[in-house]
């Protein structure tokens, strides 16, 4: 006999509380394992495709691992040093940008930026703060011993975890399915399928869109000759997972830098704007419909709320968990709404049921 609903809620509630408590207490230690699991989940369709074309699971995992190592080495040698160098230079050039902006506004609006005015002081102070704090933060993150150790640990543990999880992914899913409560297994499988569909559409689809657009923005801006084009492309691609935010932030940053660099050469400034316009057209008409689709079910506001709440509670690990948790909660909420709309609480008693209901016995006897 199945447990009463109240008992089931108690046990599932205890399990959820233990999970969040462990996440809060061991967030930093669990980070490599969450990253490894995310990478394995992202690459599982590739392994399945290789298996469908005649490879064993071990061979498919080996091919993916070797390919990933080659890509990582190329990126580490060709992209990361330039990215870090441009980021440091961008932080260092911020005060000069602020002074140039103040000079430009003074020439155009002399009454607004008098010497000693609040606006002028704010611009100068903001540029100086970004230069000092941003540069210090980046240099500290890159040079401190603890950060280097953490980076090394990530680079060692994450790939190992990802390889093992990718190799055993199908067996783990089958084992989890065997442990499901038998009475609720069909419903849990249905919800898990919907969650996987949502995550697959968002993480895999949007991850690919971010990679494509980030690469396009970086290469196009560097071909135009924009300083810090690689950094701008990286930022725009990274933020693309939130609709319109990546293009807006990246576009404003790129056009702002272009105004300082190409002032007077308007065709280059227009070229920077055209780069982002082409990126938006490609994303809206080709990339997102093909790679993500329309059935993701993760509203941008819901996603931002999940990232904010889980990030504040559990740090960077919370931000990694936020997307799958948001997808799972969204699926569960839709399931609860579906059950509610099919219940008597929502539908009430229809007229057909009222007419077909038997008359009270006392009433029928009185009529006789």
Image (cartoon, rainbow, N blue to C red):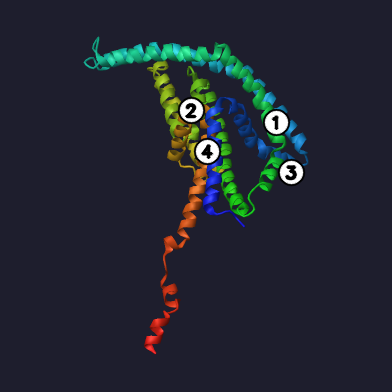
Q: Earlier in the sequence, mark 2 or mark 4?
A: 4
Quick one: label 1, few (<14), some, or many (20+) residues within 10 Å? many
Q: Earlier in the sequence, mark 4 or mark 1?
A: 4
Identify the residue position indicated by label 1 in the image. Answer: 163
Identify the residue position indicated by label 4 in the image. Answer: 17
Q: Earlier in the sequence, mark 2 or mark 3?
A: 3
Label 3 – label 4 distance at C-alpha: 40 Å
Quick one: label 2, few (<14), some, or many (20+) residues within 10 Å? many
Farthest-out residue, top: 115
Name the element at disc 2: helix
Q: Percent x, y for residue 155?
A: 64, 22
Q: Which residue occupies 41% across, 79% down?
A: 360
Residue 35 versus residue 175 in the image, above or below:
above
Q: Which label number is shown at residue 52?
A: 3
Name the element at disc 4: helix
Which mark is in front, 1 or 3? 1
Residue 71 versus residue 292 in the image, above or below:
above
């Amino acid at each position: 006999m199945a447990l009463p609903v109240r008992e089931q809620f108690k046990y599932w509630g205890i399990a959820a509380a233990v999970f969040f408590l462990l996440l809060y207490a061991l967030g930093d230690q669990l980070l490599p394992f969450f990253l490894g699991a995310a990478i394995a989940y992202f690459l599982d369709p590739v392994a399945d495709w290789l298996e469908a074309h005649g490879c064993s699971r071990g061979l498919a995992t080996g091919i993916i691992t070797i390919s990933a190592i080659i890509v990582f080495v190329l990126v580490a040698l060709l992209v990361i040093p330039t990215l870090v160098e441009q980021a440091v230079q961008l932080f260092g050039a911020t005060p000069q940008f602020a002074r140039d902006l103040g000079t430009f506004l003074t020439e155009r609006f002399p009454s607004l930026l008098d010497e000693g005015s609040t606006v002028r002081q704010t611009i100068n102070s903001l540029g100086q703060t970004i230069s000092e704090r941003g540069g210090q933060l980046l240099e500290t993150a890159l040079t401190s011993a603890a950060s280097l150790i953490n980076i090394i640990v990530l680079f060692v543990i994450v790939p190992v975890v990802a390889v093992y999880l990718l190799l055993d992914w199908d067996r783990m899913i089958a084992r989890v399915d065997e442990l499901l409560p038998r009475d609720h297994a069909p419903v849990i499988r249905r919800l898990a399928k919907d969650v996987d569909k949502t995550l697959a559409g968002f993480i895999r689809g949007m991850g690919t869109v971010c990679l494509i657009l980030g690469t396009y923005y970086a290469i196009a801006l560097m071909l135009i000759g924009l300083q810090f084009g690689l950094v701008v492309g990286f930022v725009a691609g990274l933020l693309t997972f939130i609709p319109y935010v990546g293009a807006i932030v990246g576009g404003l940053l790129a056009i702002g830098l272009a105004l300082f660099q190409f002032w007077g050469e308007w065709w280059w400034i227009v070229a920077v704007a055209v780069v982002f316009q082409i990126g938006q057209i490609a994303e809206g008409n080709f990339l997102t419909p093909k790679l993500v689709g329309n059935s993701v079910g993760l509203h941008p506001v819901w996603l931002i709320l999940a990232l904010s709440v889980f990030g504040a509670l559990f740090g960077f690990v919370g931000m990694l968990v936020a997307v799958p948790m948001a997808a799972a909660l969204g699926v569960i909420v839709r399931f609860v709404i579906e059950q509610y709309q099919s219940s008597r609480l929502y539908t009430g008693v229809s007229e057909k049921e009222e007419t077909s209901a038997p008359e009270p016995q006392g009433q029928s006897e009185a009529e006789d």
